Image (cartoon, rainbow, N blue to C red):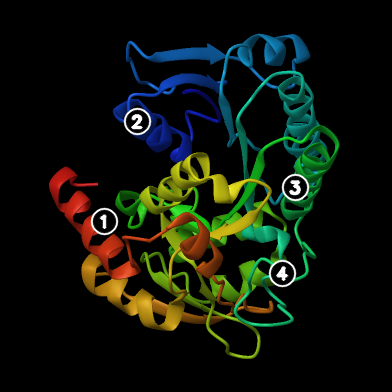
Amino acid sequence: MNILVTGSAGRVGRRLVGDLLAADHEVTSVDLKDPGVTHPHLTHHSGSIADPNFVERVVDNVDAVVHLSALMSWKDEDAERMFEANVNGTERLLESVSRRPVRRFVLASSGEVYPENNPVKLPIDEDHPTAPTSFYGFTKHLAEESVRFFIRRYQLKGVILRFSHTQDAPELFDPESWFSGPRFFLSRKLQTAQERGQHDVAEALTRYDDGEEKLVISRGRDGTPFRMHITETADIVQGVVRALDREEAVGETFNIGSDEPISFDEVVPRMSEYLGIPTADVRLPVDAPSYRTSNQKAKRLLGFQPQWDFERMMKEGAEFRHTTGR
């Protein structure tokens, strides 16, 4: 198949493009950045799906589409750009695809469409009510609804995948990582809170800032430790590939993520052992995200089987750090 991958230079996109090429697919790559891959079966187009003419060109002669590109931000000033990229961009791509004989359209959505900080039941499965509490989650919810409309109206062979939080194992111990830094490292967590105008969160963290880097055991206002799924990129890509291959996927929505959530009070001390830096056990003036998401539907219908747990991610991250000195 000739598979169009939007967001091909991103974390998931780079890995997916490599796996598709290794499986002898033709890949049409779309991103503002070059994915940094050269291959005789890869055609890259630098551009934005904000341009309808660009979209019309890149969807010609493709058999399937994996729509990964999105803008993710928690800054209020980015709301308009997020809506344009994640909602209007998705609709624009669907419009072009609906006029062509595309065999599969896979949308990368997010667990942010659920109220992960306040679930009505656990585990969170695909039937759980969607009630996003972030603007990013709201845009993903609307993108999902666009796909469902095109499934109903144009018989699009669409699939919706709700990704968990995703990281490459080697970035786990990197304080400069866009995900891992603000999640685990005191310096980046404090900086991020200040940039977002979360003054009460910044104040709580500042009490532990003595100039020495620390890992943060984050807790909510009532002492509940943060608990969430973090999934290695390779497992997310496995889910995407299976969604492309399986007829059972068509018209369905799947949670794609690790088997078990991590609890910060358990894993951060282990990370501290690997890194040799102290921890700070911090109650933050927020409700702790504390949830468990079910991937049983993806296992049952797609044959999805995660290969990574968090311990393996830590070992891989530590080995990368040792080898590279980063």
Tell me the tag on residue 180: none
Gap between marks 2 and 1 measured at Cα: 21 Å
Q: Which residue is mark 1?
A: 317
Of tags 3 and 1, the one toward the viewer is 3
Q: Amino acid at mark 2?
A: Gly
Rendered view: 287 above or below 135: below
- For numbered disc 1, what is the local secondary structure? helix
Q: Answer few, some or many: residues within 10 Å of disc 4's Cα (few below 14, many 20 plus, some between 14 and 19).
A: few
For marks 3 and 4, give the CA distance: 14 Å
Q: Earlier in the sequence, mark 3 or mark 2?
A: 2
Mark 2: give few (<14), some (14-19) or many (20+) Cα within 10 Å: some
Residue at the left extreme? 323
Earlier-in-chain disc, 2 versus 1? 2
Residue drawn where x is 48% and y is 75% of the image = 208
The image's mark for residue 127 is 4
Please say if 138 is above or below 186: above
Q: Earlier in the sequence, mark 3 or mark 4?
A: 4
Name the residue carrying label 2.
Answer: 18
- Along the horizontal axis of the image, is 5 left or right of 253? left
Q: Amino acid at mark 4?
A: Asp
Residue drawn at point x = 69 percent, y = 54 percent: 196
Q: Position of residue 135 (x, y in %)?
A: 78, 52
The residue nearer to you, when weighing 186 against 314, is: 314
